[in-house]
Amino acid sequence: MGSDFYQLSILPYSGIIIKICRAYTNSQEDFEDYYQEVCLQIWRSKDNFNQQSKWSTWIYRISLNVCLTHLKKSKSGITDISSDALPEEVIDDSKAFINDDINQLYNAIKHLSEIDRALILLYLEEKTYAEIAEITGTNTNNIGVRINRVKERLHRHLNQQGVTNE
């Protein structure tokens, strides 16, 4: 992957990739593996980007697809991700497993179904219902209802864990 492509087309969107990878991993090592695989898939599929949607939407879709694919593979015992060190700017940016409040939120999110995780992450990114539907390949009409149900489940889970929202 060329460093120009990475600097211009991936790094500005690393926050998206970090959040999605963080929601589907349980360790820093897995997080780094998923992040690298997402970057590789973005590079591999860049020629397929048809500009019918925003580049950020494309990044979300690839990130979700990669994470869901690897989650299914890990459940079946298949692993094929190789890990090298992440670029420094990503490690500095991510702080993925350091903040306790963030860890509690991600822990609660991990109790959701795979699609509900994606929905709440996109909602937290302030994506419109239309953008969420486009990224997840679902119907716009039921996004709002599903997000409200997900928020209720997260709230219940955090309350059961003794986490307050003060």
Image: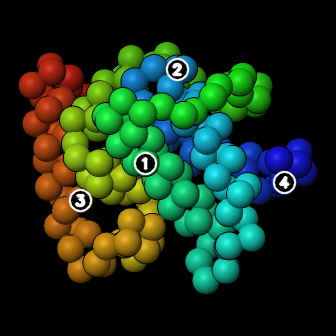
Three-letter amino acid code at disc 4?
Phe
The residue depicted at 21 percent of the width and 74 percent of the height is 142
Disc 2 from disc 3: Cα separation: 28 Å
Q: Is residue 15 visible?
A: no
The residue depicted at 68 percent of the width and 63 percent of the height is 45
Name the mark on residue 147: 3
Bin the neighbour count of mark 1 within 10 Å (Cα to Cα): few under 14, some 14-19, many 20 and up.
few
Bin the neighbour count of mark 3 within 10 Å (Cα to Cα): few under 14, some 14-19, many 20 and up.
some
N-terminal of the two: label 4 or label 1?
4
Disc 2 from disc 1: Cα separation: 18 Å
* Image: 106 above or below 46: above
- Residue on which disc 4 sits: 5
Bin the neighbour count of mark 4 within 10 Å (Cα to Cα): few under 14, some 14-19, many 20 and up.
few
What kind of element bears circle 2?
helix
What kind of element bears circle 1?
helix
- Residue on which disc 1 sits: 69
- Residue on which disc 2 sits: 28
Q: Are marks 2 and 1 in contact (CB under 8 Å)?
A: no
Bin the neighbour count of mark 2 within 10 Å (Cα to Cα): few under 14, some 14-19, many 20 and up.
some
